Image (cartoon, rainbow, N blue to C red):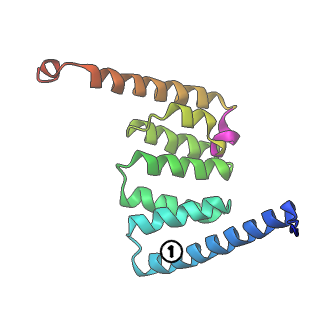
Amino acid sequence: MSSEFRDPLRSMAEELTEQSKQIAFEIDFFERLARLDPANVRVLVALAENYSILEAYDKSLPVDRQLTQLRPEKSVFWYNLACSYARLRDADAAFETLEKAIALGYDDVLHLIKDPDLKSIRSDPRFQAIFRSCKKRRLESRLEACRPESDSAD
């Protein structure tokens, strides 16, 4: 009866090493694709996500900016840009882009208050105003969805 003991710390370290290798591979892959097709939104989203996983916010910031230029109507791209600014401690830019995200329809209130990316700006009084605006937008969209069709035709 032989049982092999595996050190849990070593197993975790090996797993983290494998994940790091995978992320490095993906970043290299998506950077190459982005050079070939700089307007490919899917590639840029994947690249920004991988940079964020590595907490390389200085690298995700230009990609997030590029996404808002390519798809200025997408509220989630503005939200992600605000997160990058907040992580880099640029509160003014973070609030400006967060307001833009909400104006475009971003209304995930729970994510807004729990997102660790926004931790650096949460104590700023402007955050409460943004939170209220986001809550109001969410309520308005829910009310709009509940209206009978005859009301919306008027």
The residue at 35%/24% (across/down) is 142
Q: Quadrant of the C terminus?
A: top left
* Residue that carries the numbered disc 1 in the rendered image: 30
The residue at 67%/32% (across/down) is 124
Image position of 35 with respect to 95: above or below: below
Q: Quadrant of the N terminus?
A: bottom right
Q: Residue furthest front?
A: 1
Query: Residue 106's x, y, as percent?
Result: 43, 38
State the image quarter where residue 42 is shown. Answer: bottom left
Q: How busy is the neighbourhood of tag 1: few (under 14 within 10 Å), some, or many (20 plus)?
A: many
Image position of 102 with respect to 52: above or below: above
Image position of 126 with respect to 75: above or below: above
Query: Residue 94's x, y, as percent?
Result: 58, 45
Image position of 103 with respect to 50: above or below: above
Q: Is residue 100 left or right of residue 60?
A: left
Say which element carries label 1. Answer: helix
The residue at 55%/32% (across/down) is 110
The residue at 38%/40% (across/down) is 104
- Chain part drawn in magenta: 117-122
Q: Is residue 24 left or right of residue 33?
A: right
Q: Main secondary structure of the magenta part?
A: helix
Pick whichever, 88 or 42, lies toward us.
42
Q: Is residue 120 left or right of residue 146?
A: right
The three-letter amino acid code for the residue at tag 1 is: Phe
Q: Is residue 81 left or right of residue 137?
A: right
State the image quarter where residue 105 is shown. Answer: top left
